[in-house]
Image: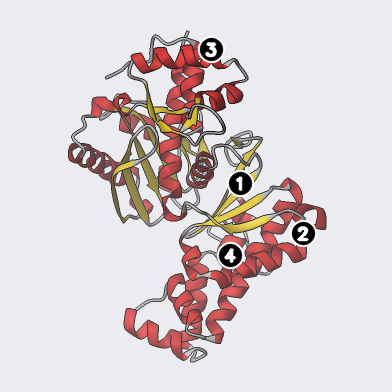
Amino acid sequence: MPRWDQLSASEMELLQTVFWSADSSRHMLADRLDCSKSKVNALAAGLIEQGLLVETGLRPSSGGRRPETLQLAQGLGVVIGVDLGATSLDVAVMTPDLRVLARHSEDADVRVGPGVVLARVRELTRELLVGCGMSPKQVIGIGMGVPGPVDFETAQLVNPPLMPDWDSFSIRDYLAEAFTAPVFVDNDVNLMALGELWRLQRGLQNFMVIKVGTGIGCGIVCHGEIYRGANGSAGDVGHICVDQNGPRCHCGNTGCVEAMAAAPAISRRAMEAAQSGESATLAELLAQNGKLTAEDVGQASRNGDATANAIIQHAGSLIGQMLAAVVNFFNPSHVFIGGGVTQIGPLFLASVRQSVYHRSLALSTRHLEIQYTPLGGRGGLIGAGALAMQESLRLQGAKP
């Protein structure tokens, strides 16, 4: 495998810039690095010779010779991305430019504790590596997203409401028993935001990603970097109160938007409507499936069920109410919405938008775009891979 432990600071900076500027020419990289093209040519030539960069093709000509594009070499190794949700587990092996080589998704329950879940992560990672013809020694870094507040420096969860048994458990030490590669852990929504930042090649500097699933969280990109706050809890918007007289949340307070508008709340409201006879469509779906999910509510809505429409609009309005306050405070250019509840369909997004635009200041929303995440269900995994690659490059670049 090529090595990067003897590289200069300038060479490491070029590798990092190439990672964030997929398929860029030397001229574009020189602009991003604010240095001469001749210096980039010299650095790139050395890195290509060492097997760390490759030329990947020609960009369209703007007059004159068509420029060659550069990419991180596949021979560098692979990164592992782990996206752990409250009820799901997604693991992938990716190339340094985050192309997925192998992926496995399955249902999971974080409440069974870190020992069981992380043992499964290790098992799946080994199986996927074998399937790719790779060994653990070829892993550059491991990135993992978890559904709770994370102290980024220690890679430990801090009083996570959805997974109390994980408090202060060292995920890094556990995975280090099986892999020599560095392990980086962050909140799952931060990784969704990082995934979008990578997709955009840092083209947007100030935006938010909202995840609506079992819980509700927010990843914040400020000046082109993930903003984690003083202790890693920035973006914990699910526990913003939207109704003082609302139901009790698992955090102990009442009226949290998570308790009133996340997937479990939508399912609960649908069950009530089905059992009370308020909705024949939902009652029929309940009889067929034995339970009702947020996706079932979306299906009923698409079939024209008025009660399902009202449930979706209510949840979207409450999330929009919460978002309006955040938008007024942060003034992002974009809000991307992801998570399982996005499968409900366009009515949910329309309800969120209406509520945000109604409650936010005109200046905050003049150029604001609110849409579903373009990466969709891949966002967490891509973000986990981006975290592994970004932090591994930083770690190497920080060495004397």
Q: Residue at x 56, y 77 (%)?
A: 311
Mark 3 or mark 2, whichever is nearer to me: 3
Look at the picture and state if 153 lies above or below 101.
above
- Helix or strand or loop: what does disc 3 sit on? helix
**Among numbered discs 4 and 1, the one appearing first in the sequence:** 1
Label 4: which residue? 248
Are the residues at dot 3 and dot 2 in contact (C-beta closer than 8 Å)?
A: no
Mark 2 or mark 1, whichever is nearer to me: 2
Within 10 Å of disc 4 (Cα), the crowding (few <14, some 14-19, many 20+) is: some
The alpha-carbon separation of the residues under discs 2 and 1 comes to 18 Å
Front residue of 109/180: it is 180
Three-letter amino acid code of the residue under disc 4: Arg
**Among numbered discs 4 and 2, the one appearing first in the sequence:** 4
Label 2: which residue? 360
The alpha-carbon separation of the residues under discs 4 and 1 comes to 21 Å
Mark 1 or mark 3, whichever is nearer to me: 3
The alpha-carbon separation of the residues under discs 4 and 3 comes to 60 Å
How is colour applied across the structure in the image?
Answer: secondary structure
- Helix or strand or loop: what does disc 1 sit on? loop
From the viewer's perspective, is 166 left or right of 181? right
Front residue of 179/19: it is 19
Picture quadrant where residue 71 is located: top left
Label 3: which residue? 39
Are the residues at dot 4 and dot 2 in contact (C-beta closer than 8 Å)?
A: no
Q: Residue 235 — which label?
A: 1
